[in-house]
Image (spheres, grey):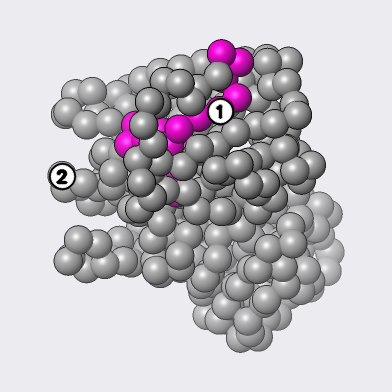
Amino acid sequence: MRNEVKNNKSLVKADKQLWLVDNNNYFSRVDKFLRNVLKNVPLSAIYKLFRTGKVYVNDKRVKEPSMKLEIGDRVEIKNEDISKYNREFKELRSAKMKLDIIFEDDELIVVNKPAGISVHPGKNVNKPSIIEGLKYYGEKTGFEPFLVHRLDKETSGVLIVAKNRQTARELSEMISSRNVEKRYVTMVFGRAERQEINVPIDSQEARTIIKPLKVFRTKIGGEWVELTLLDVEIETGRKHQIRKHLSMKNLPIICDNDYGNFRLNRAFSKKYGLKRQFLHCKKMALSFHGKSYQFIAELSEDLQTVLKVLESEVD
């Protein structure tokens, strides 16, 4: 850890473009640090600051958003007036919500996230998010929730949340360092074989390992198609990684409206009643503070229903 910097207040400019990293604002990555202190600046603008060389740490230019920070570092934005950004930011509210809690202790709470609910509030989203539900629960039971990873809105399954800032820092570091096992269940159009997909995503390394569990054949939209139920393990956590990688291999996830087959999705949804992508985080496993954890989330009811109908067609 670098030496603490004296006279902290003198380091912070009136225009709020220089910050000292301390215990209250620390994030291990510089991009996450800036996202936290620049809540009124759009994410796209923050990452543009990196691309254009306007982010400095300890007076050295930084272009890699994932650069690690330490307590005592000085983060500064140069040659850009960030006061011009006025993205609306609302403090996190709390909302009463029924939570499917898989596990809870003094440091962690793990929930089986349902599809259709965002992990965090977003634009034009009126329905309470998971973190808002956890905030309400935390106010009643005495903790503050901190997200350490995300799941897409339409993805269900294991979501680990820290109960304090220090635990969140450590867990975030573990996840980014690939020291957490992450396994998913998905179903795709096409016949898939066991393989590793190592195609970079957004110029960053990405690794996905897929293993077929079962192949189905069914008639959709007037044609016979094959479907493969997959076990998926990811060693990196890029945005939409599984969805993008499978689409690249011509194995689009069923009912994925961003990277999938629109025509087949519509026909499948009409026949089987599935209203979201067939993707579920079934397991996360890690060792933390001398304990081994394995969190399992049962497949959600809508996905179980699809499997039961497909199984009945085979019979």
Residue 67 higher or lower than 251, as above or below: above
Q: Amino acid at mark 2?
A: Asp
Q: Position of residue 15 (x, y in %)?
A: 61, 15
Q: Secondary structure at mark 1?
A: strand
**In the image, is residue 295 part of the stretch drawn in magenta?**
no
Q: Main secondary structure of the magenta part?
A: loop
Tell me the residue that label 2 is attached to. 106
Residue 111 seen: no
Instruction: Identify the residue shown where x is 21% and y is 46%.
Output: 107
Which numbered disc flags the more N-terminal residue, 2 or 1?
A: 1
**In the image, is residue 16 part of the stretch drawn in magenta?**
yes
Please indicate whether residue 186 sits to the left or right of residue 62 in the image. left
Residue 265 higher or lower than 101, as above or below: below
Instruction: Identify the residue shown where x is 28% and y is 31%.
Output: 144
Please indicate whether residue 244 sits to the left or right of residue 215 in the image. right
Instruction: Identify the residue shown where x is 56% and y is 53%.
Output: 67
Q: Position of residue 13 (x, y in %)?
A: 55, 19
Residue 152 higher or lower than 87, as above or below: below
Please indicate whether residue 83 sits to the left or right of residue 291 in the image. right
Q: Nearer the viewer, mark 2 or mark 1?
A: 1
Say which of 23 and 296 sits in front.
23
Tag 2 and tag 1, C-beta contact below 8 Å:
no
Please indicate whether residue 275 sits to the left or right of residue 287 in the image. right
Q: Which mark is residue 18?
A: 1
Range of magenta residues: 14-28
